[in-house]
């Protein structure tokens, strides 16, 4: 395993597969692992709001016998100017793992550079690797495997899209994304996905047409049009993303047994209709549950306890 989980690209293909295997085992037999992290703790630091990341890490650590410690940027001395580097060094003397959710990606990188315990990226403006693990677990659960499947992502080329694209490339899953002009995935992550895909045979396609992206896909995925920190762009984005709503018509273009995914929280009537997210093809709450199983697997692996 890598020392930290900052990006899915930190994981080799076998390591990614093995985390998903372990997550499945943790889902099936949680009691068998209830003492695995007894006496250990994780610091959970948030600059942004969170429901799933906060509670799934907290409950997951408790289920493994360990202790979560919730930290917010408002409470820590970081808010009064203490450096990330000093905070990393100090937290490392108290806790066994650090998870953080930040605006700037380099804050997480800096924490990892100075921490002497494993650091987990719980979302930055650029990446959301923990989400992508749960996404792949959900597809794997549904179809019994990943290879040869295709995920279509409709909307903003954001943190969730970046990590999902990288995860698909790493796992050998085909990925097609349709984004409005100006909202494409970042070139550096597209290049990275291309390099990883060359090793696994995954097909990575970008474009602007949601119908073309969704055609024949096994899973259709959307995320909010306005991410945390972009609230002042909301009106412009509502206009720019017109036509990118995942609705029943778009789902009908996917494969007959296609599922719908969303990292949540969602906005019904914007990136997805209520009929889709609340409909029979939606797996969004299984996906949310899988955050916990996959993150338990990550914590165990980073601490070399499973
Ligand atoms: N999907 C996700 O990360 O949710 P939260 O923002 O609630 O943690
Ligand atoms: N793209 C969203 C994901 C939230 C889990 C955001 O960054 O706000």
Image (cartoon, helix red, strand yellow):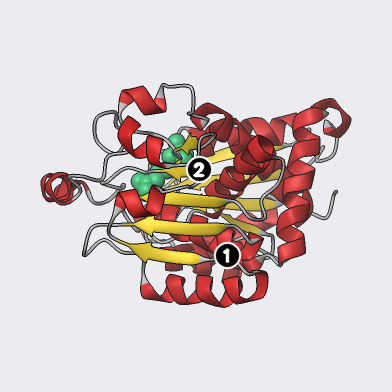
List the residue tagged with mark 2: 219
Residue 87 — which label?
Answer: none
Q: Quadrant of residue 38?
A: top right
Q: Position of residue 119 (x, y in %)?
A: 62, 58
Q: Earlier in the sequence, mark 2 or mark 1?
A: 1
Count of number-bearing discs: 2
Left or right: 112, with 15 as reference point: left
Give the percent coordinates (x, y) of residue 174. 55, 59
* Residue with the mark numbered 1: 169
- Above or below: residue 294 compared with residue 176: above
| Residue 122 in view here | no
Q: Nearer the viewer, mark 2 or mark 1?
A: 2
Percent x, y of residue 49: 38, 39
Secondary structure, mark 1, is helix
Identify which residue, 207 or 302, lies in the foreground. Answer: 207
Name the secondary structure under disc 2.
strand
Residue placed most toward the observer, 65 or 221: 221
Q: For the residues labelled 2 and 1, say whether their Cβ atoms are less than 8 Å apart.
A: no
Question: Within 10 angstroms of label 2, few (less than 14), some, or many (20 or more) residues?
Answer: many
CA neighbours of label 1 inside 10 A, class few (<14), some (14 to 19), many (20+): many
Whether 14 is drawn above or below 44: the answer is: below
Residue at left offset 21%, top offset 65%? 182
Q: Residue at x 35, y 33 (%)?
A: 266
Alpha carbon separation for disc pair 2 and 1? 15 Å
Q: Is residue 139 left or right of residue 304?
A: left
At horizontal 60% and vertical 31% (from top left) the residue drawn is 289
On screen, 228 above or below 126? above
**Quarter occupied by residue 205:** bottom left
């Amino acid at each position: 395993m890598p020392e930290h989980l900052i990006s899915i690209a930190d994981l080799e293909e076998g390591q990614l597969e093995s985390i998903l295997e372990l997550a499945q085992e943790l889902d099936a037999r949680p009691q068998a692992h209830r003492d695995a992290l007894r006496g250990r703790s994780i610091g959970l630091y948030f600059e942004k709001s969170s429901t799933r990341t906060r509670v799934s890490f907290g409950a997951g650590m408790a289920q493994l016998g360990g202790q979560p410690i919730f930290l917010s940027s408002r409470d820590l001395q970081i808010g009064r100017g203490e450096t990330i580097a000093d905070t990393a060094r100090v937290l490392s003397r108290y806790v066994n793992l650090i998870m953080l959710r930040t605006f700037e990606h380099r804050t997480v990188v800096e924490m990892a550079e100075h921490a002497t315990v494993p650091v987990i990226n719980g979302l930055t403006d650029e990446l959301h690797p923990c989400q992508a693990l749960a996404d792949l677990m959900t597809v794997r659960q549904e179809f019994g495997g990943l290879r040869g499947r295709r995920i279509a992502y409709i909307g903003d080329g954001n943190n969730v899209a970046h990590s999902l694209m990288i995860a698909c490339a790493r796992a050998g899953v085909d990925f097609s994304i349709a984004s409005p002009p100006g909202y494409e995935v970042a070139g550096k992550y597209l290049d990275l996905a291309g390099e990883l895909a060359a090793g696994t045979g995954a097909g990575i396609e970008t474009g602007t047409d949601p119908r073309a992206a969704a055609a024949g896909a096994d899973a259709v995925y959307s995320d909010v049009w306005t991410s945390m920190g972009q609230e002042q762009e909301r009106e412009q984005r509502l206009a720019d993303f017109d036509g990118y709503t995942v609705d029943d018509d778009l789902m009908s273009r996917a494969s007959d047994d296609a599922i719908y995914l969303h990292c949540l929280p969602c906005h019904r009537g914007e990136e997805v209709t209520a009929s889709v997210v609340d409909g029979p093809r939606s797996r969004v709450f299984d996906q949310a549950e899988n955050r916990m199983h996959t993150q338990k697997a990550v914590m165990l692996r980073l601490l070399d306890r499973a």
